Image: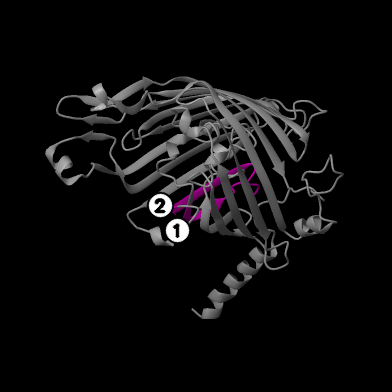
Amino acid sequence: MKTSKIVGPIIFWFGMLLGAHVGPQDSSAKDPYSGDFWSRSTLTGDWGGLRNELAARGVTLDMSITQVGQGVVGGGKNGAWEYGGRSDLILNLDSGKLGLWPGGLFNFEMEGNWASSVNPKTGALMAVNSSQQYPLPPGDIFGVPAWNFTQYLSPYFGLTIGKFATITADSGDMNDFAHGKGDSNFMNLALNFNPVTALTTPYSTLGTGLLVSPTKDPNEAAVSLYVMSANGNPTTSGFENLNGNAVMVAGEGRVRTDFFGLTGHQLFGTIFSNKKFTSIDQRLDRDTIENGALRAKKGSWNIYYNFDQYLYEPKKGAGQGVGVFTRLGVSDGNPNFMKFFASFGVGGTGMFESRPSDKFGLGYYFINLHNPTIVGPLQTTKLLRDEYGFEAFYSFAITPWALLTPDIQIVRGAQKDKVTIGQGPLGLLSRLNRKSIGTGTILGLRLQLLF
């Protein structure tokens, strides 16, 4: 067979792909940054028209600062009030709108946090101020969690590669009422994503993936499959940690539903890692004591699910109204000690016509722990207990770019006791003091500014 008979059709079909619209459908509003000081979407506006022009050409630059004052007013480990914040910058480029080639999308994110939070003072595994957790580790740190490139080869299919933030405003266990980095919806980490995935999934890591949109519109249905490094950090490039024995595979699918004529979504995902983790069950035998090495367990898996369903939706598909949500997750139970997770609640955006940017949420979560144990010659020590918590918030839109959110949380943390070292008799001997950690009540006030 002549080469031209093969090459010709390939060139023809490749040309058809590049000539067609590829990638997700563009539903962005015209002149998204316009308006007067009180009604526009961002504090700095459209920059004399330049920002709208850049957006029309596929270049968007979004900036925000989130500040939180929060205190443990009852229970927990410490009642002190803390103040801290997080800044975020996201740059997106669309090669098609730039006039280069169709279907190419570049994403870049920088973020930093400062000062301190009450997260270590509650006795809970789940951060009550999840915004302050990013980038990891929290506290006066700056990082680049994302720089990646996606190329859609058709309206149905795309490939992506680079460094990914595994939780963003529009990806990673998405949910219309309970999702994000704690800057716009719930503040508690457990109500923003499924924590059974935390052990296997670094917040920021290198990877590559396959994106599929079965219905041409990714808002109707989307499937993703990623292979990623099981080691990652937003403050490093990630290349130094690449290891074939520390890889995770993540698959997720989300579909839009139309129950009762109202918008809803169903999401299912699973993650497997071949990384070597520390086993949660440690037997203090001679070998462990002499070598100082903890027992390891290779591999971990989890399965997770969530749904959201509008119960009141003034305009279908506009992202406004009131609805309910649920998350469920299970894991192997060892090395992942979060064996089962559940959360549910109600949330809404723009519940009143006169307040289109206001939000509210009521949520509850429960984590069943396979309690880590240390088995010694004389006794077995259990370190944790099951954790549960409740959160309620209302976000007042002073303007569309200034959101003030009072928040209350009641959390019984997984940590049972606070242990300190004190003086013994005559000040000669030290002793361990144990103090039970009760259910904590946490009050907070969040201010988010969009620039």
Residue 87 relative to residue 116: left or right: right
Name the residue furthest front: 426
Judge by depth and name the residue closer to the eye, 10 or 53.
53
- Residue 413 position (above or below residue 196): above
Picture disc at residue 231: 2
User: Where are the magenta residues, as a range?
Assistant: 205-232
Residue 403 relative to residue 189: left or right: right
Q: Which residue is mark 1?
A: 238
Residue 396 percent location from the top left of the image: 73, 30
- Residue 258 position (above or below residue 91): above
Residue 347 in view: no
- Residue 12 position (above or below residue 420): below
Quadrant in which residue 277 is drawn: top left
Q: Amino acid at mark 1?
A: Gly
Residue 98 percent location from the top left of the image: 72, 64
Quadrant in which residue 17 is drawn: bottom right
Q: Residues within 10 Å of mark 2 (few under 14, many from 20)?
A: many
Q: Residues within 10 Å of mark 1 (few under 14, many from 20)?
A: some
Judge by depth and name the residue closer to the eye, 266 or 162.
162
Q: Are marks 2 and 1 in contact (CB under 8 Å)?
A: yes
Magenta stretch encompasses residue 172 = no
Residue at image point 57% right, 56% down: 158
Quadrant in which residue 7 is drawn: bottom right
Helix, strand or loop for the magenta stretch, by majority: strand
Q: Earlier in the sequence, mark 2 or mark 1?
A: 2
> In 3D space, how far apart are the residues under numbered discs 2 and 1 (Cα atoms)?
8 Å
